[in-house]
Image (cartoon, rainbow, N blue to C red):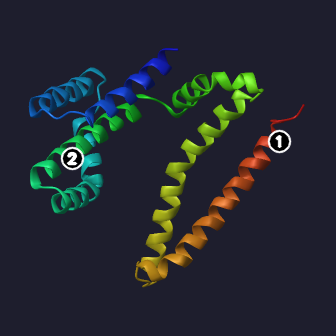
Amino acid sequence: MKNVLIFLGFILYATAIFFIQNPWLFLVVLFLNLLAMLFLKTKLLEAIENIMKILPFILLTVVINWILENYEYAIFVAIKLLLVCNSTYIYAKTTSVRGIAITIKNLCMPLKLCKVNLDDIEILVCISLSMIPILKKEYRQLKEASLAKGMAINLKNMKPILTKLMVSVMKRVNELEESMIEKGYGEV
């Protein structure tokens, strides 16, 4: 139940950030984020690296909002995105994949009335979240191999890379299926 409350608190906090209009409240939220990082022992340099990875997306959002609205609104949107991404980073670093899966399972408790197997949901969430780093690694390896072969990485050449990635994903899915069958999962 504690994980569910933390998750719902995180969702409410991240959503509330987008409704802030007062610049002083942004400072309060920034202070809360920094306080959470200190309290939860999250590394500041890793948080900055994470922000740097998503900075192009935030800058694109700023430019679009600047064109459609004005520069003040664009800056507010950028600050909101930075704060939400930072709080998401903090949540992700302090919660395990298993913890998130258990939280989702607990949130889906009302589905038990419809005879939905909540253990299946938990396993699916675990598998899905565990596959993300594997997919990133596979994509990075395929991209590096393509660059080593002298193939330029652009939209035209993405089809072979994505095809190889999908073949690799299907192999991993088959391995996972065989492993689950070997362990007797899903047998009645």
Q: CA distance from mark 2 to mark 1?
A: 50 Å
Q: Are marks 2 and 1 in contact (CB under 8 Å)?
A: no
Q: Earlier in the sequence, mark 2 or mark 1?
A: 2
Seen from the viewer's position, the closer of residues 98 and 64 is 64
Amino acid at the residue labelled 2: Val
* SS for dot 1: helix
Left or right: 18 as drawn, with respect to 116: left
**Looking at the image, residue 188 lies above or below residue 181:** above
Residue at horizontal 44 percent and vertical 83 percent from the top:
151
Residue at left offset 72%, top offset 23%: 112
Foreground of the two, 179 or 101: 101
The residue tagged 2 is: 77
> Residue 182 bears which disc, if any?
1
Extreme-top residue of the structure: 1
Q: Residue at x 16, y 44 (%)?
A: 76
Amino acid marked by disc 1: Glu
Residue 4 percent coordinates (x, y): 49, 21
